[in-house]
Image: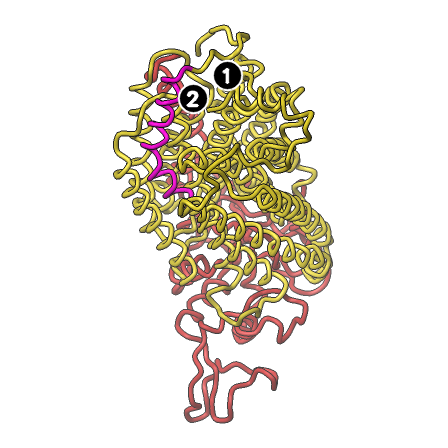
Chain colours: A red, B yellow
């Protein structure tokens, strides 16, 4: 082959075919992915199908709150460099059984955490699977901080205040130091003495930290799957 | 590709050839030196960022500045190394080699320099964008979304002239290096445009996003870095050794195997991830199949150098290139091994992937580019490298540091992944177990910074016309007297 034209055509074919299969086709599949409605009655037989608790809902449920902004901040701060959001199936890792990586935050995980599926990321601009897993997985981080948003802020501001071994960076630029007004903010950080601000000052999360908290506290990628996806009606034990 | 007989020795060099080569070298002088010097400056900047990010892994409070946090300094380092150093060094080599192999003078050096300035501006804006908090989470595409059109346009403005040169080449044999250079010209715009269109323009990619980013990163490695690196080593090795490539057929086969297989690979980085299982499976299979062209290239290089290994000791270009060829094999083998599902439970989200990326970017590509730069710069500046011992210093400190870095990152990855693979442990064990290796990494970075500082200084002196004006080529060692006769024959015979 000595002709430029033949070379370019062959090269183009070699690259274009895989580009379709490895890039365009998966993209189209995700872009066109639809939510799946829970069905109460089995089509045809009319027997009970999905769990009645999900009546009128669909999977995955839409994300509430200022999530988009939080997702952006998660991306630009490079959280995904060290935190994954993926629960791998049992043939690929132990993620489903890790303590605290699912709903159950205490003790051994009796019921395996559900592996993450394509639908769990369908509302996202770019699925935050993550590049490394230096810190814990965040697929279900919402459960870790439910009702404890101030714990999250404390981790964000001073990761080693609670866990001395952590190598997570602190994100102090997401917080504001200001004079205490009245009784002070409910979100003011309760820091150990060596990190505490000067007398009469308090450290509160900025709107960016609040958006990030909304995002992380909303991470619960373990919603029960509709039977139409799993193909099998869940038995009471495995629910 | 042509089936000419390559068993004949190289034809004799006529005085016209020598004059023509000098004219070609003069025509490429400005853009090539521009790309080499700005690449070397970016290399030093990237290694400094690499040092910062590696310190941040063990001492997150280091320097106390939030915009240097690991989440920002790590992508800033990698993108500066890739787009700042690797691409510019590669472009310099591409321009010079294409002109030489096509035997045509470069008609428009100024256009290339202008495009090079745009490229530099794009990279600088991108790196600053990442550090100041406008980056993205996409692997190897972390630059803010405004940067990619700048890079794409300036890259195309440069390579279009290389294709034009190829079209205007003096008729005759096409060298294997030219095919690799052409492949690099076309492949990067394709994969870069594809990845950016889907991720930055169309968006809403959900879980396909990370798969596309992984595909892109893998293909930058195997469809851009590898072709440019191999073009350089297929050029340098026969030149220094003084005989043609052992088997042109094998080289041609390896080329087409690489081009046909590597665009399938990439998504194996997401083994076990929430993707249809066929995607990582096919990608992993392709990555393993890539071993075929790799071993063919390695065998070809080995058989070409066989009998002349003494020259690896003496010639700076050949020594760096030879090391880079070994780096190519190591990169590909480790990338193939890490496709294993059994290992992936420990390795798929740990430092091992950094080890492979660094191995490809540094042990293979960077070292090969050093070899090419040591070969090209004396020819276009008209003076010889100032000191052999300084080149020796650069080689050993770089070689030691990049081997150490790869080994330490692999070890850190395995220990981190294995410690995290127990159901009841926090990440505490993982972080403590890998800490020692990560501290060792810092030391290796310091070595790299020193080596690259020496290199930048040496290169700057050459560019400022302060090189040795007279005498023979600078060698790493002074050859023993009984080697001298043989050496004159081997280097002069193939002398460019």
Mark 2 crowd level (few <14, some 14–19, many ≥20, 10 Å Cα): many
Q: Is B43 in the magenta? A: no
**Relative image position of residue A199 (x, y in whole percent):** 51, 93
The mark nearer the N terminus, 1 or 2, is 2
**Chain letter of the residue carrying label 2:** B
Quadrant for residue B463, please give it: top left
Quadrant for residue B94, please give it: top left
Q: Residue at x 52, y 16 (%)?
A: B253
Q: Which mark is residue B179?
A: 2
Residue B480 in the figure: left or right of residue A48? right
Please tell me whether residue B456 is drawn above or below residue B477 in the rendered image: below
What secondary structure is the stretch in magenta mostly built from?
A: helix
State the residue in front, B334 or A25: B334
**Chain letter of the residue carrying label 1:** B
Would you name the residue on which mark 1 appears? B252
Mark 1 crowd level (few <14, some 14–19, many ≥20, 10 Å Cα): many
For the residues marked 1 and 2, what is the alpha-carbon distance in whole angstroms? 9 Å
Do callouts 1 and 2 mark residues in contact (Cβ within 8 Å)? yes
**Relative image position of residue B461 (x, y in whole percent):** 45, 48
Q: Is B34 in the magenta? A: yes
Quadrant for residue A62, please give it: bottom left
């Amino acid at each position: 082959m000595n002709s430029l034209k033949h070379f370019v055509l062959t090269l183009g074919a070699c690259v274009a075919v895989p580009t379709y299969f490895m890039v365009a086709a998966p993209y189209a599949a995700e872009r066109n992915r639809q939510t799946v409605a829970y069905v109460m009655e089995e089509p045809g037989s009319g027997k009970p199908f999905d769990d009645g608790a999900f009546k009128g809902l669909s999977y995955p449920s839409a994300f509430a709150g200022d999530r988009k902004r939080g997702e952006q901040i998660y991306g630009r701060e490079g959280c995904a460099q060290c935190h994954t959001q993926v629960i791998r199936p049992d043939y690929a890792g132990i993620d489903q059984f890790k303590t605290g990586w699912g709903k159950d935050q205490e003790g051994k995980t009796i019921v395996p955490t559900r592996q993450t599926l394509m639908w769990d990321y369908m509302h996202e601009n770019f699925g935050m699977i993550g590049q490394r897993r230096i810190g814990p997985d965040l697929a279900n981080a919402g459960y870790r901080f439910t009702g404890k948003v101030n714990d999250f802020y404390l981790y964000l501001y001073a990761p080693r205040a609670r866990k001395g071994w952590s190598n997570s960076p602190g994100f102090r630029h997401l917080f504001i130091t200001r004079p205490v007004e009245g009784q002070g903010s409910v979100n003011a950080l309760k820091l150990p003495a060596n990190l505490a601000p000067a007398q009469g000052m308090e450290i509160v999360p900025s709107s960016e930290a609040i958006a990030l908290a909304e995002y992380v506290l909303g991470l619960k990628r373990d919603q029960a799957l509709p039977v139409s996806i799993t193909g099998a009606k869940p038995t009471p034990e495995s629910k | 590709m042509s089936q000419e007989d390559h068993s004949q020795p190289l034809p004799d060099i006529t005085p016209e050839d020598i004059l023509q080569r000098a004219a070609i070298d003069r025509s490429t002088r400005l853009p090539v030196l521009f790309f080499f010097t700005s690449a070397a400056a970016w290399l030093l900047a990237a290694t400094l960022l690499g040092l910062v990010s590696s310190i941040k892994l063990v001492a997150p409070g280091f320097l106390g500045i939030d915009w240097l946090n690991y989440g920002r300094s790590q992508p800033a380092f990698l993108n500066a190394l890739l787009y700042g150093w690797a691409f510019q060094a590669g472009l310099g080599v591409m321009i010079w080699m294409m002109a030489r192999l096509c035997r045509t003078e470069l008609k428009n050096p100024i256009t290339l320099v202008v495009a090079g300035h745009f490229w530099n501006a794009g990279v600088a804006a991108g790196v600053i964008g990442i550090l100041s908090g406008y980056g993205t989470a996409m692997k190897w595409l972390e630059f803010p979304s405004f940067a990619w059109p700048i890079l794409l346009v300036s890259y195309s403005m440069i390579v279009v002239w290389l294709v034009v040169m190829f079209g205007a080449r003096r008729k005759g044999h096409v060298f294997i290096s030219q095919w690799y250079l052409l492949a690099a010209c076309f492949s990067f715009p394709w994969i870069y445009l594809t990845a950016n269109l889907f991720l930055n323009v169309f968006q809403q990619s959900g879980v396909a996003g990370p798969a596309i980013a992984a595909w892109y990163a893998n293909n930058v490695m195997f469809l851009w870095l590898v072709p440019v690196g191999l073009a350089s080593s297929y050029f340098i090795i026969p030149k220094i050794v003084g005989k043609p490539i052992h088997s042109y057929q094998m080289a041609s086969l390896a080329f087409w195997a690489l081009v046909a297989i590597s665009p399938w690979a990439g998504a194996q980085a997401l083994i076990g991830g929430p993707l249809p299982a066929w995607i990582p499976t096919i990608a992993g299979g392709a990555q393993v199949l890539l071993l075929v062209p790799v071993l063919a290239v390695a065998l070809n290089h080995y058989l070409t150098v066989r009998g002349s290994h003494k020259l690896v000791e003496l010639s700076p270009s050949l020594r760096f290139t030879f090391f880079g060829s070994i780096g190519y094999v190591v990169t590909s083998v480790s990338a193939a091994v890490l496709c294993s599902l059994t290992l992936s439970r420990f390795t798929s989200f740990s430092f091992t992937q950094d080890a492979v990326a660094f191995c490809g970017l540094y042990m293979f590509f960077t070292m090969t580019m050093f070899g090419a730069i040591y070969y090209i710069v004396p020819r276009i500046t008209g003076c010889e490298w100032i000191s052999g011992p300084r080149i020796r210093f650069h080689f050993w400190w770089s070689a030691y540091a990049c081997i150490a870095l790869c080994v330490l990152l692999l070890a850190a990855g395995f220990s981190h992944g294995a410690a995290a693979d127990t159901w009841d442990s926090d990440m505490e064990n993982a972080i403590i177990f890998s800490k020692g290796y990560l501290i060792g990494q810092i030391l290796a970075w310091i070595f790299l910074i020193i080596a690259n500082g020496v290199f930048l200084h040496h290169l700057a002196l050459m560019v400022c016309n302060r090189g040795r004006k007279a005498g023979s080529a600078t060698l790493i060692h002074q050859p023993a007297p009984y080697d001298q006769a043989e050496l004159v024959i081997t280097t002069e015979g193939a002398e460019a």
